[in-house]
Image (tube, rainbow, N blue to C red):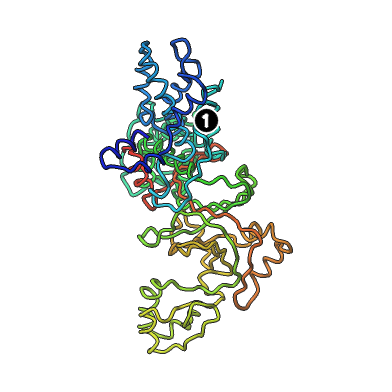
Amino acid sequence: MRVLLLVCLLLGCSSAVLAQAPADPVAQAYQRGGVTALWHRAGALTPTGSALLQQLLNADQRGLHPADYSAQQLLTLSGQKDAASQAQLDRQLSQAALLLIGHLQRGRVSPAAAGYKLPVPVDVLDPVATLISLAASTDVAAALDAYEPHYNHYHLLKQALAHYRQLAALPALPVLPPLTARSVRPGESYTGAPVLRALLARLGDLPQADAEATGTQLDSVLSAALSRFQARHGLQADGVLGAGTIAALQLPLAERVQQLQLSMERARWLPRPSGPFILVNIPQFRLYAFRGPGDSEQHMLAMNVIVGRTFPGHNTPVFMADMRYVVFRPYWDVPASIARNEILPKLRQRLAWGAEQDYELVRGQADSSPVVAWDESALEPLQRGELRVRQKPGARNALGRVKFMFPNPYNVYLHSTPAQSLFARTERAFSHGCVRVEDPQALGEFVFAGEAGWDGARIADRLQAEGGPERINLSKSLRVIIFYATAIAAEDGRILFLQDIYKHDQRLKRLLAISD
């Protein structure tokens, strides 16, 4: 309200604008509670007020920044005993509490600012009632916990953050000596083996007892620990010490703390679905199908996926949509940009290539649109966008045997693929933006679990059948979230750090003003 009044004084506002301005919830809380102070009694902070101040000072434990709430200034002000200072502190504590709660619920920045098409969580809180309730709480920490995301993996991230803060505060270990060859393979000698053991033990990938071993050989125990580290960091888990692994080992742990903070911020943007949903984590190249937000890793469906390339324009976008139908034996409707830039040059070189790859030229946007014969005269209409290219269902079809459709502005969907060998790669950013799934049968069984008459056998029959496209509308839509998180805390205690393949972490750090 004070900010709006200042703007109006500078620019001039009508009385109607001022009349519509929201009332100050802090002032309303004191008025509704019939009190002059929420956090003070008899000239001193109440236990609840002291606990709130401590939570603001320790906001970094929640992946937030105490400076956002002027925590140190509030601590200084709390040492003043005059009535005016205490009144000022009381109101500033109330303002800071509301700001903190808003950050816990919705994050510090909006998903849109980060380039994500995720809905901003709706604020259903009554801020006045919230303040009054918090001031009456006997456990401020628990009261604030209730505003954080209820996903189990968010709380695991919170624990991981505390652990990595402790690791980052330890004295730095010696730097690994440079490699004298391109890599050190299991069984080979490396002068930095003792430092490597110490590093892996500190990070939890090597048992402490094994860290006491001597010698310079990359023996089987050390190589196995190195493989565990590599698997946690999105690297090829081969137990070979190369430049990429050394770079990951030597990355300052303060940067790992930042990765955890960024994942916690993004987790606050997630909706709170009550039923089944699908989540794809782009940097992890993994899909997870949840029966509900409380689903454990042991019971959820998980599989490898292939996502969009790292080239601009081919990135898989971050967004949320509802799956509404499934198409078995689909056409691949080639995007116009791919038709012009990739397919048309090949057709100009040899027209027969199109038919050999099971492509068709089509006039119109429907599956029933007329097919145009392959002819040199058709290439210019294709260039102008008057014709389009599609690939017929079959063994060569880029979409495989099925696509799972959740209409969205990006024309991105989940689909199978004939290129199964790519799923064995550690990094799987090969598509033009859509998401290829490793196990369409298992995903189909999850998607159709609530559909009458559909079981695994029927899905398998549809996947193996020949013929044209078959669309099946879902009786109930299924939420799909395409997400981006480079730090994950698993239920088995592992903490995963993934490559920032699209540089989204860099952008979010700038928005949050997190320095390297």
Residue 462: image location, x then y, percent: 66, 70
Image vertical order of residue 331 relative to residue 60, above or below: below
Task: Please state which of residues 284 and 40 is positioned toward the viewer in this rendering.
Answer: 40
Residue at x 38%, y 84% (from the top left corner) = 381
Residue 414: image location, x then y, percent: 53, 62
Task: Please state which of residues 169 and 48 is positioned toward the viewer in this rendering.
Answer: 48
Q: Quadrant of residue 198?
A: top left
Callout 1, which amino acid?
Thr
Q: Quadrant of residue 76?
A: top left
Read off the residue under disc 1.
130
Image vertical order of residue 386 relative to residue 244, above or below: below
Residue at x 47%, y 47% (from the top left corner) = 120
Task: Please state which of residues 470 and 428 is positioned toward the viewer in this rendering.
Answer: 470
Residue sitting at the far left: 10
Residue at x 49%, y 51% (from the top left corner) = 281
Image vertical order of residue 19 relative to residue 320, above or below: above
Residue 388: image location, x then y, percent: 44, 79
Asked if one can make out residue 51 in the rendered structure from this viewpoint, the answer is yes
Residue 265: image location, x then y, percent: 44, 40
424 sits to left or right of 182: right
Query: Considering the image in quadrants, where does the N terminus appear?
Result: top left
Question: What element does badge 1 sit on?
Answer: helix
Residue at x 43%, y 71% (from the top left corner) = 335
140 sits to left or right of 343: right
Task: Please state which of residues 333 and 110 is positioned toward the viewer in this rendering.
Answer: 110
Query: Considering the image in quadrants, where does the C terminus appear?
Result: top left
108 sits to left or right of 300: left
